[in-house]
């Protein structure tokens, strides 16, 4: 820099300060800058702006430029003494693309129009509005955004609030234009109305309105999220619309551009205090999701709530699987609220036909194996959506009830099996254990309550009967193998009267029939043998009779016949008695032979008694099952 002569050698001029260039190609002296800027509207720079000597002190972002003589920038003044780094003016001492300056946090380009650049100039601000960024020159593709001042808004037919600079090149020239015109701002009546009616001097949301004591409700269940009959819990998606009147929120439409309805946050108005009853969600703190409220010029306020309600149910398991469940989703009003159901749907959701009202109080609902209806009711400052549903029994009929019925029927086989078979007890115990498993399966579907389902009580009764009859069956087996004769009264009552009542006939005939066919006891046989040996004349010895030889097959000799004739007629009667005894003896011997060979069963009185007792148990078991069904049904609740 020492080789350059000092600027003071040039009289009446500053060699560092080049005359300002204007957009129309003229120039202006420094002392004439203010006048020239007003005439030519704005200054510009050529090339990269190294020769720019204007007084712009703002960056493109609108930040103020820092002074060049600060300690952090003083080295540039010494290095580029010719660049006129004075005050905080925008300059380009180091050959960048355009003039720049230091700002807080770094450096930025300055908002200066290039003399030879083609672009869009500042379109100005809309009436009652602003624009951003605030630049003098916009290059091709740059965007500008327009906003309205507070209390104003864009008209419905207004151009977009954003515009882009578009440069178009033709054969003769290059032109630049904005993609749209300036938008139009108008008074924001909604903002003005909101500011007027919700001002602290006019409205206090802490106090209930004089007309807001009654809150009308219409609601419905959108969906059942989950249903747990074991724990008696239900989670539902609920939609509820509330409506009340607040005279402090009335206004005249003509004063606010015909505005009839506005929407405001629910935290800006008074709203009735509501609490979800029978709630089991521990995270629920008594609040509902925040929503907008609809306020009309008549002072009517409408609020719509959509939330997940986690509530408890009441299950009646007695008629399982035809059991039913009642799940009320209830909202309890505060002390300054009276809840009633709405007569019709207005305003909040006019197109939503699912809402339940006073005129449409119920609707069908289906969830999984449960189906029923949901009903809207309001009483005692409480509005309830009551879900009444019943289980579809088809699945449980096939998988739970049918096995129980089959096991009850299979128990009958215990009384049909032969008494002398040991498998009877084992079969009965197997059926009894199977009933225990069925009872566990049935109770596994239901909550633990004081009332057992009908089918469970019936299974318990059947198990008790099975256990009792198994003990009786053991006694019957013991009686079956007992020997001897019954007392006359027992033979008459059991083998005669009861046997006929049980469709077994008169069992005493079997005993008489057995006697007629040689069913004699051993004592009787011995007696007959003795008598035969004594009275039989002409026999060689008693062995002939014992061996079953009939003496009539050997005719007597002539001497024997003369002896018989001399002793007749007394001897003739003895011979007839002997013949009868021999026939009885022959039948007894045949019966004993068959008994010893296993071809026929010896029928005893105790054996027949066991058959009668077994048939009694069968009839009592079947009758007990049929009697237990209505008794359990009516007395089990």
Image: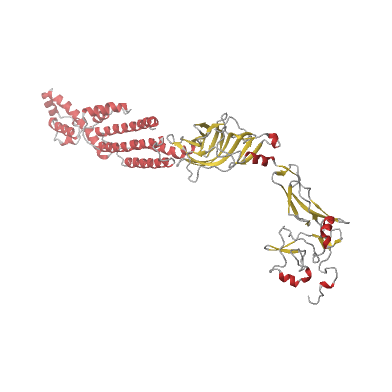
| Image quadrant in which you'd find residue 419 | top left
Residue visible at 31% across and 29% down in the picture: 504
Residue 355 locus on image (x, y percent): 58, 34
In this rendered view, identify the residue nearer to me: 562 or 191: 191
Q: Quadrant of the N terminus?
A: bottom right
Say above or below: 578 vs 448. Answer: above
Residue 422 locus on image (x, y percent): 31, 42
Q: Is residue 285 left or right of residue 304?
A: left
Residue situated furthest right in the rendering: 172
Residue 96 locus on image (x, y percent): 76, 66
Residue situated furthest front in the rendering: 12
Q: Is residue 604 left or right of residue 288?
A: left
In this rendered view, identify the residue nearer to me: 29 or 311: 29
Q: Is residue 508 left or right of residue 303?
A: left
Say above or below: 35 vs 154. Answer: below
How many marks do you count on the picture?
0
Q: Is residue 411 visible?
A: no
| Image quadrant in which you'd find residue 215 | top right
Say above or below: 51 vs 488. Answer: below
Colouring: secondary structure
Residue situated furthest top in the rendering: 569
| Image quadrant in which you'd find residue 204 | top right
Q: Is residue 104 visible?
A: yes
In this rendered view, identify the residue nearer to me: 474 or 353: 353
């Amino acid at each position: 820099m020492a080789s350059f002569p000092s600027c003071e050698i040039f009289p009446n001029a500053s060699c560092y300060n080049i005359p300002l260039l204007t957009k129309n190609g003229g120039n202006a002296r420094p002392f004439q800058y203010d006048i020239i800027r007003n005439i030519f509207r704005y200054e510009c720079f050529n090339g990269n702006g190294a020769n720019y000597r204007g007084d712009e002190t703002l960056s493109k972002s609108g930040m103020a430029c820092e002074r060049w003589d600060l300690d952090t920038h003083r080295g540039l003044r010494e290095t580029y003494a010719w660049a006129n780094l004075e005050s905080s003016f925008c300059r380009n001492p180091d050959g960048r693309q355009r003039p720049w300056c230091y700002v807080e946090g770094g450096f930025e380009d300055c908002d200066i129009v290039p003399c030879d650049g083609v672009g869009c100039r500042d379109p100005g601000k809309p009436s009652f509005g602003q624009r951003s960024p605030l630049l003098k020159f916009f290059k091709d593709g740059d965007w500008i955004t327009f906003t309205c001042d507070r209390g104003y808004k864009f008209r419905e037919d207004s151009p977009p609030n954003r515009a882009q600079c578009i440069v178009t090149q033709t054969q003769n020239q290059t032109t630049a234009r904005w993609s749209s015109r300036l938008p139009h701002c108008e008074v924001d009546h909604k903002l003005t109305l909101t500011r007027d009616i919700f001002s602290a001097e006019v409205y206090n949301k802490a106090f209930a309105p004089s007309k807001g004591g009654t809150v009308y409700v219409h609601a419905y269940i959108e969906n059942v999220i989950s249903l747990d009959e074991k724990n008696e819990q239900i989670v539902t998606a609920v939609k509820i619309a509330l409506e009340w009147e607040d005279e402090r929120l009335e206004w005249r439409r003509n004063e606010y551009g015909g505005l009839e309805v506005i929407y405001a946050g629910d935290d800006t108005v008074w709203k009735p205090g509501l609490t979800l009853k029978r709630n089991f969600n521990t995270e629920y703190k008594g609040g509902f999701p925040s929503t907008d409220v609809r306020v009309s010029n008549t002072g009517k306020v409408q609020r719509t709530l959509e939330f997940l309600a986690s509530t408890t149910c009441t299950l009646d398991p007695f008629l399982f699987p035809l059991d039913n469940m009642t799940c009320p989703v209830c909202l309890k009003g505060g002390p300054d609220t009276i809840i009633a159901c709405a007569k019709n749907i207005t305003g909040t959701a006019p197109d939503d036909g699912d809402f339940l009202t006073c005129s449409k109080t119920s609707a069908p609902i289906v969830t999984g194996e449960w189906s029923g209806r949901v009903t809207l009711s309001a009483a005692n400052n409480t509005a309830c959506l009551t879900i009444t549903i019943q289980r579809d029994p088809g699945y449980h009929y096939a998988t739970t009830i049918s096995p129980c019925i089959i096991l009850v029927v299979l128990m009958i086989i215990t009384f049909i099996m032969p008494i002398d078979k040991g498998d009877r007890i084992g079969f009965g115990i197997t059926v009894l254990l199977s009933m225990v498993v069925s009872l566990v399966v049935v109770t596994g579907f239901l909550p633990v309550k004081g009332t057992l389902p009908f089918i469970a009580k019936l299974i318990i009764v059947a198990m008790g009967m099975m256990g009792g009859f198994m003990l009786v069956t053991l006694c019957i087996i013991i009686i079956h193998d007992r020997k001897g004769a019954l007392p006359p009264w027992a033979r008459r009552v059991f083998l005669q009267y009861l046997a006929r009542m049980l469709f077994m006939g008169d069992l005493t005939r079997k005993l008489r029939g057995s006697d007629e066919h040689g069913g004699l006891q051993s004592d009787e046989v011995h007696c007959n043998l003795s008598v035969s040996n004594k009275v039989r004349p002409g026999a060689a010895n008693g062995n002939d009779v014992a061996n079953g030889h009939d003496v009539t097959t050997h005719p007597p000799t002539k001497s024997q016949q003369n002896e018989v004739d001399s002793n007749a007629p007394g001897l003739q009667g003895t011979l007839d008695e002997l013949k009868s005894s021999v026939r009885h003896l022959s039948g007894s011997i045949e019966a004993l032979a068959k008994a010893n060979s296993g071809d026929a069963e010896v029928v005893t009185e105790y054996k027949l008694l066991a058959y009668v007792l077994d048939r009694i148990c069968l009839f009592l078991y079947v009758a007990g099952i049929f009697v237990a069904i209505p008794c359990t049904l009516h007395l089990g609740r």
